[in-house]
Amino acid sequence: MSEHAPVPPSDRRTFVAKVSAAIVGGIITLAAPIAGLFPLLDPLRRRSDTRGMVRVTSFAALPEDGVPRKFPVLDTLVDAWNRTENVPVGSVYLQRTGENAVRALHSVCPHLGCSVGYNAAGRGYFCPCHKSSFALDGSIADPKSPSPRGMDPLEAVVRNGEVWVKFQNFRKGSPERVAV
Ligand code: FES
């Protein structure tokens, strides 16, 4: 006769359930603190506030005749230990389109990333690198332009006389506008 009495199935199930619960509990207990360590372990990882809106200039600074002006975009960069204010992150063309209405276009060419200039004579934009030209609304003006899409519009609002822009960058060289 065996020295060990057979374990009843219900006891076995209880044992397996307890072990499973302990393993799952252990994973949950460890996961939260480990996840919390990631920002500390990667001090160079930058979290930018550019996903939110940033103040760019006053509405009064935009020419009343609708000529666009280029403005730098300054933002706050934050990492695990530092917060740096007024860091240049790009630039935008702002154009007054009405009372308290503004159009914002990213100043970087969607073709390969050169800086687009305003062409006062042509009342539009021109990229000197490969000769893409764009209308004032950012659409492609010359069908021979190598740029696969028009200039990238940015969300902009006027609040209390200040122009705020949701600044973001987009993938270059692609017909689709994909935020990066
Ligand atoms: S980078 Fe602007 S046309 Fe090529």
Image (cartoon, helix red, strand yellow):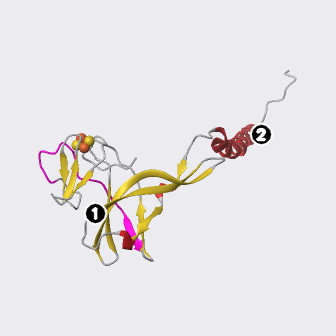
How many labels were placed on the picture? 2
**At x 28% / y 73%, what residue is drawn?**
64
Residue 29 - label: none
Q: With 20 as the anchor, is 151 left or right in this view?
A: left
Query: Is disc 2 surrounded by few (<14), some (14 to 19) or many (20+) residues within 10 Å?
Result: few
Cβ at disc 2 under 8 Å from ligand 1:
no
Q: What is the secondary structure assignment of the residue under circle 1?
A: loop
**At x 77% / y 36%, what residue is drawn?**
8
User: How far across and how far down the image is residue 165, in percent?
Assistant: 41, 63
Q: Is residue 98 above or below residue 85?
A: below
Residue type, mark 1 in image: Pro
Query: Is disc 1 surrounded by few (<14), some (14 to 19) or many (20+) residues within 10 Å?
Result: many
Front position in the image: 117 or 84: 117
**At x 19% / y 58%, what residue is drawn?**
124
**At x 71% / y 45%, what residue is drawn?**
33
Q: Is residue 25 above or below residue 59?
A: above
Q: Name the residue under label 2.
A: 11
Front position in the image: 14 or 129: 129
Cβ at disc 1 under 8 Å from ligand 1:
no
The span picked out in magenta is 141-158
- Answer with the quarter of the image where residue 128 lies: top left
Q: In this view, does 101 lie above or below 10?
A: below
Q: Does the magenta stretch include residue 152?
A: yes
